[in-house]
Image (cartoon, grey):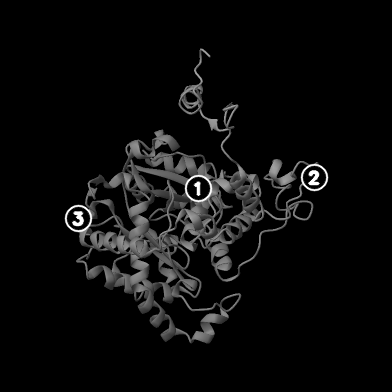
Amino acid sequence: MNRQQIFDYYSHDKISSILVNNSKEREVAGAFFDGTYDSRPNALQFDSDVTQMVKKGVVSFHYSVEHWKNPMAIQEKNYNKLRAGWDLLIDIDSKLGLEESKAAVMIIRNFLEKYGIKNFGLKFSGRRGFHVCLPWIMFPKEINYSKAEVMYPEVPRILSSFLRDKISGELMKELLKKKSAKELIATLEEPPSSLSPYFFVEVEKNWGNRHMFRAPFSLNEKTWLVSLPMKYSDIVAFSAEKATPQNALNSGFEDFFVGEENEAEAFLIDAMDWHSMQQKEKPKITKKIYYENKMPAEAFPPCIKTVLAGLADGRKRSLFTLINFLRMMNWPWQEVEQTVFEWNEKNRPPLPRNIIISQLRWCQINQRTPANCPPDGEMYYVSTGICKPDEICKAGTEKIVIKNPIVYPFKKMKKLKKVKPVYRGYSCMRCKKEFKSMASLNMHKSRMHGISDAA
């Protein structure tokens, strides 16, 4: 589509009014041709706001899954104060094709029906998947005596992880009906040690603060198809051709944020119970073996800490470094994914989600060591501006002596273990015992040696 066609589509009364009406209490972000976002935070109040953003070069619109009391006042320090709720947005994306994404939607629908959930939003993503929405109205507003709106992103992550766990077997069986195991494995870069349906059909489970999704009736800049809402009964016969801009303008169905009050309460209760059992089953980590099981973030080298703070340049190269570093530090895969998605929200601008998901999938089945430190790894560290060596990196020399970032934490922990308490010099001249204060030293001298201050 050219710019005039894009403008004509968004300036249509139906499209602009839907975008504005659905955006209430939501942060809105416009994306340009290259996938980067317009300035944030932003919001839509009038139809003219839509066309003004399009004139600036915006080609697609994205909403926050979080509801905000005042989207324009969002700052990192006031998330919980401003957040008024959240939706559970399940992003289904299949590298195999649209039919496999349909199969995932049908399995999810059958699973949700067991909990009495009959209403949920469904729309085409605009490319090769679908979005399923369980809106805020469906969930109880208090969970374990805490306000549900401040339990974000923890609760949505639990709900999605629970759903993924429960539908995994059925989804794998359905995929094997469509393609043989050999055909499925052929779609991967390397054969995995075991098959998971989520290698082929991703069912999103990670959110960070201010997570966005493509708005209903927004264009998808990769296909120029519309992210089109639909009834569940229409999914079997659905084809991408039905989501052209012209067909979208003639669509008679517009609802996406649909649901009844507390409709998902039973689903939430089971998910929280499941999560609680998962936590109990995890082995307790004692202080003695803590660093052998998972290296703490405070021991990370300066380059990794710089990456985790968010980047403007070198984001793709640093993504590879970050994922593989965390894996080498014995971080559980779920925490690796969560950390990477949260890191991407800090980038300026964030990387497109398809790049994050693709790199995570590849690294999950292809473990690599991060690139060596400079001079060997200048492209990964120096050119991206993340190489900021400290005394451990240089070990008192002019050059970097650490060979690889994965060595740094072990040297740092070894150094910390050698540190002993330093006293201020309150020692007994007779028996050489040390004391933390002059008062305790004087008491010792009086009791043990018969010496008083006046002596």
Residue 349 seen in this snapshot: no
Numbered disc 2: secondary structure: loop
Q: Nearer the viewer, mark 2 or mark 3?
A: 2
Q: Which residue is mark 3?
A: 262
**Type of the residue with mark 3:** Asn
Identity of the residue drawn at 70% across and 53% down: 380
Cα distance, mark 1 to mark 3? 30 Å
Crowd tier of the residue under label 2, counting other residues whose Cα lies within 10 Å: few below 14, some 14–19, many 20 or above: few
Numbered disc 1: secondary structure: helix
**Residue closest to the far top:** 454
Q: Nearer the viewer, residue 132 or 200?
A: 200
* Mark closest to the chain's N terminus, 1 or 3: 3
Crowd tier of the residue under label 3, counting other residues whose Cα lies within 10 Å: few below 14, some 14–19, many 20 or above: some
Left or right for 9, reference 299: left
Q: Which residue is mark 2?
A: 399
Quadrant for residue 132, please give it.
bottom left
Cβ–Cβ under 8 Å for marks 1 and 2: no
Q: Which residue is mark 1?
A: 345
Judge whether 434 appears above or below 171 on screen.
Answer: above
Q: Nearer the viewer, residue 236 or 269?
A: 269
Left or right for 418, reference 47: right
Indicate the position of residue 278 as horizontal and vertical percent values. Answer: 35, 64
Identity of the residue drawn at 45% across and 43% down: 51
